[in-house]
Amino acid sequence: MNGPLIVQSDKTLLLEVDHERADDCRRAIAPFAELERAPEHIHTYRVTPLGLWNARAAGHDAEQVVDALVQYSRYPVPHALLVDIAETMDRYGRLTLSKHPAHGLVLTTTDRPVLEEVLKSKRITPLVGARIDPDTVVVHPSERGQIKQVLLKLGWPAEDLAGYVDGEAHPIELHEDGWTLRPYQKQAVENFWHGGSGVVVLPCGAGKTLVGAGSMAQAKSTTLILVTNTVSARQWKHELVKRTSLSEDEIGEYSGTRKEIRPVTIATYQVLTTKRKGVYPHLELFDSRDWGLIVYDEVHLLPAPVFKFTADLQARRRLGLTATLVREDGRESDVFSLIGPKRFDAPWKEIEAQGYIAPADCVEVRVNLTDSERLAYATAETEEKYRFCSTTATKRKVTEAIVRRFAGQQILVIGQYIDQLDELGEHLNAPVIKGETSNAQREKLFDAFREGEINVLVVSKVANFSIDLPEATVAVQVSGTFGSRQEEAQRLGRVLRPKADGHQAHFYSVVARDTIDQDFAAHRQRFLAEQGYAYRIMDADELLTES
Amino acid sequence: MSSDEKPAAAPRSLAEALRARDDASLTALLRSRPDLITPVPTDLTQLATRAATRASVVRALERLDRFALQTAEALAVAGDPATYGELLGLMAGDAGDPAVAAALPRSLATLREQALAWGDDDRLRLVRTARELLAPSPQHPSPTGLGPTVQEATAGMSPGRIQEIVTTAGLPSTHDSVSAVASLTALFTDRERMAALLAEVPDDSLGVLERLVWGPPYGQVTADPAPRLRLLLDRGLLLPTAPGTVVLPREVALHLRAGRAHRAPEPLPPAVEATATHRPQMVDATAAGQAYTALATVEELLRDWDEGGPNVLRAGGLSVRDLKRTAVALDVSEPVAAFWVELAYAAGLLASDGEADERYGATPAYDEWLERPPAERWAQLAQAWLTATRTPGLVGGRDAKDHTLSALGPGLDRSAAPEVRHRVLTLLAGLPEGSAPSTESVLARLRWERPLRGPQRDQEHDLRAQLAQWTLSEAEQLGVTGRGALSVHGRALLGAPPAPPAPGQEAAARGTSAQEEPGQEAAPAGRGGPGDKLPVHRHHRSAAATGGEQADGLQGPGPLAAREPLSPAEQATATAAAARLLAPLLPEPLDHVLLQADLTAVAPGPLRRPLAEMLGVLADVESKGGATVYRFSPGSVRRALDAGRTAADLHAFLAEHSRTPVPQPLAYLIDDVARRHGHLRVGAASAYVRCDDDALLNEILADKRSAALRLRRLAPTVLATQADPATLLEGLRAMGYAPAAESAEGDVLITRADSYRTPPRTAPEPVPDGPPTPDATLLSAAIRAIRAGDLASTTPRKPTAAPVAVGELPRTGPAETLATVQAAVLTGEALWIGYVNAEGAASQRVIAPIRVEGGFVTAYDHTADEVRTYPLHRITGVAELADEES
């Protein structure tokens, strides 16, 4: 009884990472537990019914789960918890959706009382047709998604074995010249294809786009890719052109600005969920071609209406890509029932150990406002407060100090307020890229930065969203709002890749003390720490005296 | 006891049978039926009378195991008196059943021991009241499914009809009904002739009989029965009872059943089956882990209520909302929360304070409890749970008046609870170490041991089965069992021997006992009688000689834990033993935590109390269980600073207790909060002096007379004091100044909440059903007293000189009155009684008692010529009538 795992009564699992058996344990619990937090010593996993059903869908049984817990647990596992786990897992697969040669889509059961129970539910009644025999009932083909959603809510998730349509064929090959799919990416594609539909969970920066490309090469059919925003859409297109046999012309972008429908179409969530006069005008996209594969990027951000459309697409293969199954709106169950169970999950630590990703060194520098600034801050209107505190003059001095310290390395200074950026550019003697900068000028500056002709680049939020933002070893963020913490971290990961020469990437974030700037920072810190990024906090004075 | 102790003559009444029993046997009787000696009867006649009262007999019958009850039921349908052979025939059937034959002597011995049956093996009698309760009647169908005898069923039939039946059945007609019925009975009980008779009956008629054979024996017929029914009615194979109803006579049914009174006699208790076997170490560790959780939960509950718990409802108990809130606070479901609340209450750790605005709170005993070592704390909880009659499982249900039963409220006491808990755990103790039984098999076993009879079957069934289920789940919660199997400390708590047999040993034990039983049976058979008269005496003596504990044969193989709950003294010893065994199993409290950059601290196990308390202030608990996850936040750090810690203290504390370096963000957080902490100061002053002239204030402060006012300078122009404005004004005036009063505002009262305690309270007493099992001293004293009284009343003495004077009321003692009246009920004789009515007027009456029940005699009053009811206590005496009058 000296295992690395501690099972808590709230069904979280604490894994001591420095324990000698921690790796084995991680592998044993990964199929059924979601990693919630990964700070330095103890990782927190959570066991949820969905997680357990995911494990069932992947072919694990309750005995394996219980064994894993009992084997690695440091303290005896409460009996009630084990019983609960066994009972929960036992609920999956009692009901099955399948194709009946004569009746079409049917719901069958191995446990008649369960079928009786769910058929009594008012929410199931409109979704099913005639009872063929005591264990089988017809399901209206159009309700395949809804019935799965409702069954999951009733606590009897159905296994969907009804198969998929092939869709319109379209040749897609991977162009593996000078690169290959990483082993875990291959594994992910294989698991997804074998399972039919489902979600692949990979940490930020682990190359989810390539898993998407790999799956498309498997499907060899027309594909609809749903992404979060236009920037992401372009990045997908760029990657697909580069990595696959697809040409620019074969890939369409369906966004606010362009409405192209091609064999491979990349659409944004935003355009799909635009509502005009109470209807979604862009829904026809789903029916505009006979799609053979639908890829959902960033499943954890999937907006609610998209779930509704997805419910009607149950006969098509669906691939979800995400870094985390945890959704801030708690709709994990819809992901499970409509897109599919988790098909692949790469332990963060393993991919890190393989050298594909590495956390950056994150530093938060706290600057003091001057007395007059404090007074101004205290009396400012609520909406002005952030601007006030984030553009304090002290930040400039700190930024200069940081730039001096890393002189010779590639440094990006990122900010939100143009005045502040212009001022910084002037002081740092660095070019500024902002919204009004022409594309040609941008390209030129980016190229120069990439080539090392320019060491410091000041960019606004606009440039920050740009896909061809060059990589840097040091980033200094002087101001900026963060819609989603995850998005922030992903951007971070994109900008700050570990260098081949072993240079560690640094991310500095300059915040004003005792203001809402600091509150934002606290959220980020927590997220970063939970993601395993080391971070520390410095006083501006400390930094200034050091340099 | 050997046969030469037997009295020469067979006993003629229960009293005589009792008189013939030795002290050990009487002790056994009184132990199993403690209601018989409350109060102690004066003599054996009175004891016998009391043992035959309806309430006492019902109580005794309810406590019989299924086979003993089946035996009693069979005796009730057998002749009165019956022979052992007849009984065996009813129980085992014509074909015989070795298991039944082996078990019957034991069950019969039980009935004899409990004074439900008496008499030799050739003259077995069931106590009359028991017979009335168990014999089939149209109102109370017997569990045997048998109907009335031919004699009973033909009681109201016309003699002519009886003769017709006799003739149709192929018997010679007789001159009276009595002999006709007798010959019919003889025919029906003669297997060969009966078989011949039934051979003539066509199949469809036999089908009718088949339907009735296992009961209920009554069937409906139309006014003009179909030929197949007519044929049966003509031969007496069915007898009419009421218009439209027919009954299958007992003798016919028995023939069709091949002599068996019960479809399925259950001579052996169903085995408790183990569904899973875990390593004993694992079981103990799991149970110990759960025991630790139990302690933590109770502490958390009372800490939650520390500053004054929820209000007491007007009807008593905890409101549903408060229970919900508590459940959320403890992070458990409501029934589980109710269990913990009730457990703390049963252990005397919480109670209502009895104030006008009544609230629940921890008792002073809680503070003592906290000081004890963990294992003892657990043992105290476990003992309270084991012996409590309060039943948390009922919380949320409704009582007979449809009121919701609330936790800590009234109506939760169930007297059967301690006994069922003990019994269930004892059954677990009977399994090999590490075996977890299935709930169903435990319930089946309990149902066998205490079957339910008659109308209460449904409701009562529920309660005992529910109690058993609750026991299993509560035992798991409390850590008495681990993964469903009894832990080593749980075993000790029961007072069961610490080393249970391994499976092999148990099998051996089973083998021995199986050999023993037929042996026991064979020996008396060799002596010519099928059973020892009172084998149970010998059994008890040997048990008393070896262990003193009642080792009942029922226990079967396996370790013999006490069948009855332990006495308080024994329980205390067992509890202490349990605590000793548990102590090494409990996790050792840790003195370190792991600090992480995401501002959490993980305690990978239970923490030493001071450490846990300090961390509880410095951080918020985020997750509980084997480990505890704490989260630091500016708010929690501020709380620690408010509690008087300095930043340096906190740094030192974390550095001391962290296994890993203190993460920089955490250190920074503490400094950052500390930097701002106390920047603003808040205090209370009840008066102030302000003056624009600093010099004047200097002067006041320098003045010695102002010392009493305890003035303090807050700012150059402000002095503050704790004295009230009036005193300050007066003081300053006395010093010769002329101050003016300002409106006083801004008084801040700071009160620190104190731990809230009720006045000293005792834990609730268990509410047992009926009198407690008497101990040996009391029993022997009671028996001595009964014997003495009996000797006094039965010693032959000279007949009373003067017979009752004519016209005087007969005078007899209450016991004799009762006995005589009861005897008259049996014999149907009329009695002469003296009676005092409500006004105090005495009269004499001649009555024929019909029923004696609940202190009343219902009798046909010959004097008044109607049926009347007389309170027994108003009867001054009874006398039998002279022979010629009866």
Image (cartoon, coloured by chain):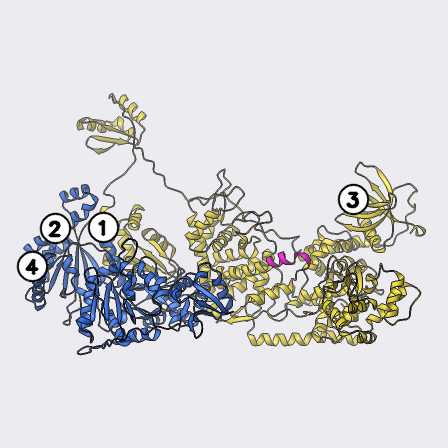
Chain colours: A blue, B yellow
- Between residues B456 and B119, which one lies in front from this camera angle? B456
Which residue: 71% across, 56% down? B58
Mark-to-mark CA distance, 4 and 1? 36 Å
Residue B523: x %, y % from top left: 75, 75
| Amino acid type for the residue under numbered disc 1 | Asp
| Amino acid type for the residue under numbered disc 4 | Pro
Give the residue at mark 4.
A431
Marked residue chain, label 3: B
Give the residue at mark 3.
B873
Q: Secondary structure at mark 2?
A: helix
Q: Is residue B711 visible?
A: no
The quadrant of the image that shows the N terminus of chain B is bottom right
Answer with the quarter of the image where residue A76 lies: bottom left
- Between residues B793 and B823, which one lies in front from this camera angle? B823
The numbered dot on residue A82 is none
Marked residue chain, label 4: A
Mark-to-mark CA distance, 4 and 2? 21 Å
Q: Residue furthest right?
A: B884
Give the residue at mark 1.
B672
| Magenta segment boundaries in residue numbering | B452-462
**Can residue B458 be found in the magenta stretch?**
yes
Give neighbour class at mark 3: few <14, some 14-19, many 20+ (Cα, 10 Å). Answer: some
Mark-to-mark CA distance, 3 and 1? 88 Å
- Tell me whether circle 3 and circle 4 mark residues in contact (CB < 8 Å): no
Marked residue chain, label 1: B
Badge nearest the viewer, 2 or 1: 2
Q: Secondary structure at mark 1?
A: helix
Kindly indicate whether the residues beneath marks 2 and 3 are on one polypeptide chain: no
Q: Is residue B50 visible?
A: yes
